[in-house]
Image (tube, rainbow, N blue to C red):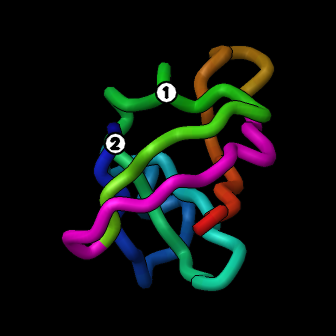
């Protein structure tokens, strides 16, 4: 289970803070981010459990974008399924 935080800053600033930016879709929509250490949890097409604002949710990782040179996740899309 990973912790997801909402964000206001743009993606480049989030990355400099050691976070991975993303977007939450579904019945809730928001700009989100996770800690870089949780990168291994982001596998396209897989269902995950996550915590957002103190509540548990289930979602599906719809897309993961990686830096082609560094092979690190730079952005992800999460679809909330509940």
Residue 41: x and y in percent read 49, 27
Compared across the picture, whether 24 is left or right of 52 comes to right
Residue at (45%, 49%) from the top-left corner? 15
Residue 17: x and y in percent read 30, 52
Residue at (62%, 38%) from the top-left corner? 47
Residue at (65%, 84%) from the top-left corner? 27
Nearest the eye: 42 or 75 = 42
- Residue position marked by numbered label 1 in the rendering: 41
Q: Main secondary structure of the magenta part?
A: strand
The CA span between labels 2 and 1 is 8 Å
Considering every residue shown, the one lying at the far left of the view is 54
- What segment is highlighted magenta in the picture? 53-65
Image quadrant occupied by the C terminus = bottom right
Residue 59 colored magenta? yes
Nearest the eye: 61 or 18 = 61
Image quadrant occupied by the N terminus = top left
- Residue position marked by numbered label 2 in the rendering: 2
Please tell me the numbered disc located at residue 3.
none
The answer to whether marks 2 and 1 mark residues whose Cβ atoms lie closer than 8 Å is: yes
């Amino acid at each position: 289970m990973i912790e997801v935080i909402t964000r206001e800053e743009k993606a480049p600033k989030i990355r400099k803070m050691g976070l991975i930016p993303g977007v939450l879709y579904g019945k809730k929509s928001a700009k989100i981010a996770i800690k870089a250490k949780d990168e291994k949890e982001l596998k396209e097409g897989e269902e995950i459990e996550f915590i957002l604002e103190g509540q548990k949710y289930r979602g599906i990782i719809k897309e993961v974008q990686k830096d082609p040179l560094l092979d690190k996740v730079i952005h992800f899309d999460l679809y909330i399924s509940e």
